[in-house]
C-alpha cells in the first residue's frame, strides 16, 4: 500500500497469478478478484484503489475498465503512476460515491 497526501493509504492489489493459470480461467479469476476488491473498497469508504495488472496484451486492463464503466457509475479509472508501475502497468480506480 502507498500513502497519498491528503487521502491516507491507497490499497494496491496485484492481480498477477501464480504459474499454472492461463487463458479464460486466468482472466476469470483475475476479474473475480478485481470486482471483490473493488466492492470491498467501496464498502470501506475508500477513495481510491490501485490494481496492478502488468503490460501483457492489455486484455485484463481493457476488461477492468469496461467493468468499471458498465457496473460502477460512481467510479472512474485511469492509468496509475507511470514512474511507479510503468506505462499501462496498473489502473487506479477513483471512488466518487459510496454504493456505486
Image (tube, grey):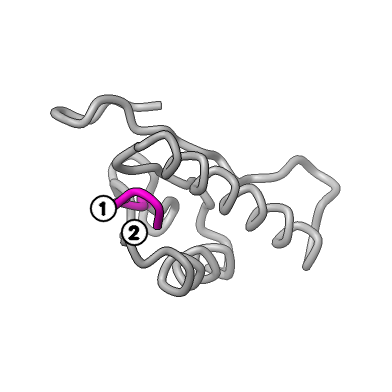
Q: Quadrant of residue 45?
A: top left
Asked if labels 2 and 1 touch by Cβ distance under 8 angstroms, the answer is yes
Quick check: 17 left or right of 76?
right
Q: Which residue is drawn at the image coordinates 75% and 57% (left, top)?
A: 26
Alpha-carbon neighbours of circle 2 within 10 Å: few (<14), some, or many (≥20)? Answer: many
Image: 21 above or below 64: above
Q: Quadrant of the C terminus?
A: bottom left
Instruction: Please identify the residue farthest to the front as the structure is shown.
Output: 99
Quick check: 91 left or right of 29?
left
What is the C-alpha distance between the residues marked 1 and 2? 6 Å
Residue that badge 1 annotates = 96
Secondary structure of the residue carrying numbered label 2: strand
Q: Earlier in the sequence, mark 1 or mark 2?
A: 2
Residue nearest the viewer, comparing 35 with 21: 35
Residue that badge 2 annotates = 75
Q: Which residues are magenta?
A: 92-100
**Spot occupied by residue 28 in the image (x, y as percentages of width and height):** 73, 61
**Spot occupied by residue 49 in the image (x, y as percentages of width and height):** 39, 42
Secondary structure of the residue carrying numbered label 1: loop
Q: Quadrant of residue 91?
A: bottom left
Q: Quadrant of the N terminus?
A: top left
**Spot occupied by residue 43 in the image (x, y as percentages of width and height):** 45, 40
Amino acid at each position: 500500500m502507498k500513502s497519498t497526501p491528503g487521502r491516507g493509504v491507497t490499497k494496491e492489489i496485484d492481480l498477477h497469478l501464480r504459474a499454472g493459470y492461463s487463458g479464460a480461467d486466468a482472466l476469470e479469476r483475475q476479474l473475480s478478484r478485481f470486482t471483490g476488491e473493488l466492492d470491498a473498497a467501496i464498502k470501506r469508504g475508500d477513495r481510491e484503489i490501485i490494481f496492478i495488472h502488468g503490460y501483457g496484451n492489455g486484455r485484463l486492463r481493457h476488461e477492468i475498465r469496461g467493468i468499471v464503466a458498465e457496473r460502477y457509475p460512481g467510479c472512474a479509472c485511469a492509468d496509475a503512476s507511470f514512474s511507479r508501475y510503468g506505462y499501462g502497468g496498473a489502473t487506479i480506480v477513483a471512488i466518487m460515491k459510496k454504493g456505486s
